[in-house]
Image (tube, helix red, strand yellow):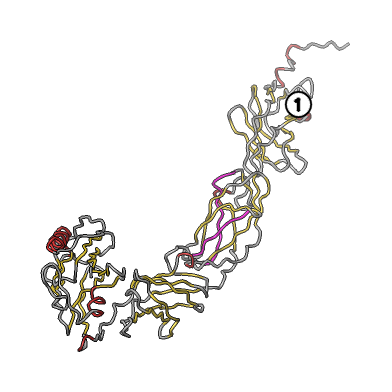
Amino acid sequence: MALIIRIVSADGKTIVSKTLPALPNHIKVPPGAKVEVIDKETGHKSSLPQYINAHAGETGEDGEGNDGSANVTLETVSNWPEAIAWLDSLAAASEGTDMGDLPTSTWYAPEANQDHGKVMGYDQNTLLIGGVIGAGVIGGAIALGGGGGTSDTIAPVAPTGLDLATADDLGSASDDNVTNKTSELTISGSAEAGSRVELFDGDTSLGTTQATEAGTFSMDISLAAGIHAITATARDSAGNTSTASSALNIAVDETAPAAPTTLNLATADDSGSSNSDNLTNQTSNITITGQAEAGSTVELFRGDTSLGTGTTAANGAFSIDITLTPGANELTAVATDLSGNEGPASTPFTVTVDNTAPAPVSMLDLAADDDTGASNTDNITTKTSNLTISGTAEAGALVQLFDGSSTLLSVNADANGNFAVDIGLTVGDHAITAQVTDAAGNISSISSALEIQILAEEPLSSLIDLSSATQTFG
């Protein structure tokens, strides 16, 4: 009979093995490692406790003349080289051939995990063997019955690592254990290899499944809407049941949020004559605000096209920057809550984008009644106040008049695009221009100049000289 003794690191990444004629009395392992025994002839693999229980009362000799039924001591050594050297020396001492060894490598445990004082012994009545949980070593007892019979009274370690499958975790994060599903929810975790794992919701059993040889399990369950504390226990083949695992808290929410409300264009982006008419000359970085369920994700749409998403604050407020094309843009918003439930669309909200500059003012003119020169169209006058300037511009647009670089005043064009406004000018030459700003805040180019000449009025005394006048009566 030949046995393969395998020592496996706590993380499962390092394995050393040697073929021996029988189970040795003494086994050295690094901190956290476990021992497996493989029957060379049958290929059957078992843990060290399982093998000892199964073969209690049998005899055999290893290379050191040790009886297979004698005491077995499991000693924790500081590192892998010690364990490898021990296996090598034991195999060399045996008369058998070292066959089928698995690849070996060197691994060092962190000092925090080393436990040189842990020595666990075995005789035909009691086995003390270590199981590794995280960075600690836990001992247990297996009582062996007389006449080679076995009786396992060690409870398995409680299952660990309970988790909701990523595909079923439909909340805002794939690891927040929030979902809108109520059935086919997959729970996974780790438990003693081959043990029967039972899941509970509080005190209610959800079903059982069997852990694999690798010590993992997964199981589909159903849950009602609400908060659930899921725990697991493991029962080994001898009927020993572990304590309950730590609880996995799962929130099931299948209620959709309400539609977002109060969609609005941010005041800073609402350009032009009003900051509340939802008219702008911007095409990018346009901020849309509104209200939705706190913590939900809000997505903005123009028709079926997604424009962007944002997350609501604790008070339900959200703001999302988007890009729009010129013209009327009808927007809607949809909220998705933390559980992945999608609500209905909001009431449509229209933002109009106008980024086209208006045409410049045309037909800028001085009113004929104010044109007092030799012609009423030569823009020469002696008036300095109440001079009426008229012209045409975009309907409803704001028209600003300038005298050179000096601003005179502003006036709005009427529905037909006409405007007229009275100004005052000083004696001299003036170049009157105009510029248009439309409702969206777009500004035109400067108009052609209206040249006006203001003449000083001659005093009446300079026009009539009575002292030099003569008249003869007769």
* Residue that carries the numbered disc 1 in the rendered image: 371
Q: Residue at x 26, y 77 (%)?
A: 50
Residue 340 in the magenta stretch? The answer is no
Q: Residue at x 20, y 72 (%)?
A: 137
Quadrant holding the N terminus? bottom left
Instruction: Characterize the local packing of mark 1: few (<14), some (14-19) or many (20 or more) Cα atoms within 10 angstroms.
Output: many
Residue 103 image offset from top left, x and y in percent: 25, 56
Who is closer to the viewer here, 279 or 450? Answer: 279
Who is closer to the viewer here, 391 or 178? Answer: 178
Residue type beneath disc 1: Asp
Residue 101 image offset from top left, x and y in percent: 24, 59
From the viewer's perspective, tell me whether residue 425 is left or right of residue 137. Answer: right
Q: Secondary structure at mark 1?
A: loop
Q: Quadrant of residue 214?
A: bottom left
Q: Quadrant of residue 459?
A: top right
Residue 450 image offset from top left, x and y in percent: 69, 26
Quadrant holding the C terminus? top right
Q: Is residue 204 above or below residue 25?
A: below
Residue 300 in the magenta stretch? The answer is yes
From the viewer's perspective, tell me whether residue 21 is left or right of residue 462. Answer: left
From the viewer's perspective, tell me whether residue 382 is left or right of residue 77. Answer: right
Q: Is residue 323 above or below residue 127?
A: above
Which range of residues does the magenta coloring cover? Answer: 282-301
Q: Residue at x 26, y 71 (%)?
A: 133
Who is closer to the viewer here, 353 or 410? Answer: 353
